[in-house]
Image: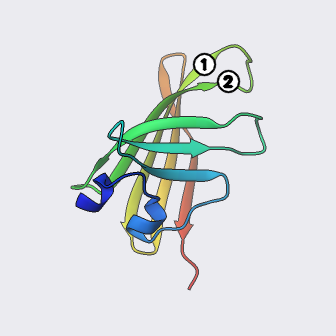
């Protein structure tokens, strides 16, 4: 993992992954945290998350408080989990905490086209 601590690097460069439109992941050498951003056409903001990587399980876990697009002025706790399944596949799972309960609200399976 030494390459991950040498400044801000795109995971695409480190793991030869591809990035979905609107998503950028990397490592911030100053804060010593992984960072992830998300932007889509559902809202007008850019969400930023920070997290950790577990090399034993090959899993990134990011946390943030998201501005709720359904109830403006409120926040929703979000956990994003990215599992590196193999060199050509990774899975992103999105969990939101509403009313004290976590619920998976999104799952995307990314498969590199050969």
The x, y position of residue 61, in whole percent, is 39, 42
Instruction: Give me the residue at 32% from left, 56% from top.
Output: 4
**Is 77 positioned to the left or the right of 51 in the image?**
right
Q: Is residue 89 above or below residue 48?
A: below
- Answer few, some or many: residues within 10 Å of disc 1's Cα (few below 14, many 20 plus, some between 14 and 19): some
Residue tagged 2: 68
**Is 73 positioned to the left or the right of 52 in the image?**
right
Viewer-proximal residue, 26 or 81? 26
Element class at badge 1: strand
Q: Residue 9 sits in which quadrant?
A: bottom left
The x, y position of residue 47, in whole percent, is 61, 35
**Is 73 positioned to the left or the right of 30 in the image?**
right
Viewer-proximal residue, 46 or 7? 7
The x, y position of residue 21, in whole percent, is 67, 58
- Which disc number belongs to residue 53? none
Q: Is residue 1 visible?
A: no
Instruction: Give me the residue at 61% from left, 44% from top.
Output: 38
- Answer few, some or many: residues within 10 Å of disc 2's Cα (few below 14, many 20 plus, some between 14 and 19): few
Q: Is residue 73 visible?
A: yes
Mark 2 vs 1: CB contact within 8 A: yes
Instruction: Say how the picture is coloured.
Output: rainbow
Task: Give the quadrant of the C terminus.
Answer: bottom right
Viewer-proximal residue, 97 or 27? 27
Viewer-proximal residue, 32 or 92? 32
Residue tagged 1: 75
Element class at badge 2: loop
The x, y position of residue 74, in whole percent, is 65, 15
The CA span between labels 2 and 1 is 5 Å
Task: Give the quadrant of the N terminus.
Answer: bottom left
- Total numbered labels: 2
Instruction: Give me the residue at 21% from left, 55% from top.
Output: 56
């Amino acid at each position: 993992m030494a390459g991950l601590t040498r400044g801000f690097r795109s995971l695409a460069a480190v793991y030869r992954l591809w990035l979905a439109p609107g998503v950028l992941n990397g490592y911030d050498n100053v804060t010593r945290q992984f960072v992830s951003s998300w932007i889509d056409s559902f809202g007008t903001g850019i969400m930023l998350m920070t997290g950790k990587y577990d090399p034993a399980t090959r899993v990134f876990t990011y946390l943030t408080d998201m501005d709720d697009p359904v109830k403006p002025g409120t926040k929703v706790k979000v956990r994003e989990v990215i599992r590196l399944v193999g060199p050509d596949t990774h899975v992103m799972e999105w969990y939101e905490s509403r009313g004290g309960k976590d619920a998976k609200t999104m799952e995307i399976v990314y498969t590199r086209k050969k």
